[in-house]
Image: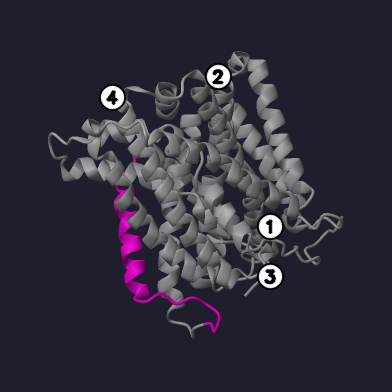
Amino acid sequence: MSTGSKTDLLRAMGRWSLVALVINSIIGSGIFGLPSVVAGILGAASPLAYLPAALGMGIIMACFAEVASRFRQAGGPYLYARIAFGRLAGIEVAWVTWLARLTAAAANVNLFVIYLAEFWPAAKSPWPRFAALTLLVGVLTLVNYRGVRAGARQSNVFAVAKLVPLLLFIAVGLFFIHRGNFAIHSAASTATWLEAVLLLVFAFGGFEGAVIPMSEAKDPERDAPFALFTALVAVTLVYTLVQVVVTGVLPDASKSDRPLAAAAHLFVGPAGAGIITLGALISVYGLLSSMTLYTPRLTFALAEQGDFPAPFAWVHRRFRTPYVSIVAFGVLVWGLAVAGSFKWNVTLSAVARLFTYGATCAALLAFRKKPPEREALRLPAGPVFAGLGILFCLVLITRMGIGEFWIVLATAVVAFLNWAWVKSRPQRGA
């Protein structure tokens, strides 16, 4: 094993592996529960809510695409903020991003066990739950410890595996919809639409983590923008059509906490409901596989730049992976999942994500003041996109509760202490 980062990480992820990674990072468990919530807010008009949500997130993704195309190193939003605004800003964004990723992963580990209880009711009991959490996180950690090719292959497999049941659900369900279910009896208010769109913005989130491992992509300048926009189109289409089927099949979609399974039960029977439940398990596991692939590259990048303890940048001699960062991620996710609940972890992740988005949009404005990179993407009216993205994030931040505010503030304080500890140490990056 190496005691430094002298060994280069392996550039093994091609264009379509990045697309699969972004899709895996976005589509998780939300699509199996959100349709009933959105239907409860907007009723028959609920499928339309995905379009403005996708438009808003498309603006954020566009900013990420331009900024990401400037870099070949690992780090994602942390690296962008560090180069654009300095070491303190980079470390602050890194901690918030790490908080969002760790808690999102822990939430999905919790949710996997909740879904598993449909087939194994004992999974809800303390010791079986403990065993299931440990096995799940352990397998994911081991696969990525042994190499990025294995992690990327696993991400590709589960990107396809999670889409298959959803596409089957759409293909079959469209023949069973009742047009009368789409009759709009009263127009929803602007506030109601905003509530639905804000909820769906979280469903479209997660893509930002997929740009972290750019040091292991074959051609990140070209492939990162392609992957982001291709995934956005695919995810929007899937989300919207799933909502169409749920709304068109169920008499009152808002009353089911498992809307896809309930709809599948109506047009296929118990076997269909079981397939959808299995699809939920695959979806959550696929999301977790992508998180375990890219999140450890954040702490690797921090340590490589001298902003985190050096062991986090150690690269395994045989597998050429940042093994300390991978193991640390696994241990922390396991701890958060065992100690916390799905709702607690989701709350932390949702709040932290807003600051990551806003910082990257602001970084675009800073980079536009520098000479353009020959290979970098330059958005038409890029500063306008950045301004709209920042405004979008500010609107969402105003929706935070006091509890979320204190958690983010505490994270910012820890990040500041981290900066105070490393500021006298030499920086290893530009």
Say if mark 1 contacts mark 4, CB within 8 Å. no
Residue type, mark 1 in image:
Phe
Residue 284 horizontal/vertical position (percent): 56, 36
- The numbered mark at residue 118 is 2
**Closer to the observer: label 2 or label 4?**
4
Up-down: is 132 above or below 107? Answer: above
Q: Which residue bears the numbered disc 3?
A: 426
Q: Position of residue 68 (x, y in %)?
A: 53, 68
Q: Nearer the viewer, residue 17 or 301?
A: 17
Q: CA distance from mark 2 to mark 4?
A: 23 Å
Instruction: Label 1: state its secondary structure.
Output: helix
Who comes first in sequence, dot 1 or dot 2?
2
Q: Looking at the picture, which amino acid does disc 2 mark?
A: Glu
Residue name at image x 65 percent, y 46 percent:
157
- The residue drawn where x is 49% and y is 37% is 168
The stretch of residues the image draws in magenta is 373-402
Rate crowding at label 2 as few (under 14), some (14 to 19) or many (20 or more) other CA atoms within 10 Å: some
- Vertical arrangement, residue 263 with respect to residue 285, above or below: above
Which amino acid type is shown beneath numbered disc 3?
Answer: Pro
* Left or right: 23 as drawn, with respect to 236: right
Residue drawn 51% across the image and 40% down it: 28
Whether residue 163 sits left or right of residue 123 in the image: it is: left
Label 1 and label 2: CA atoms lie apart by 37 Å
Give the mark nearer the N terminus: 3 vs 2. Answer: 2
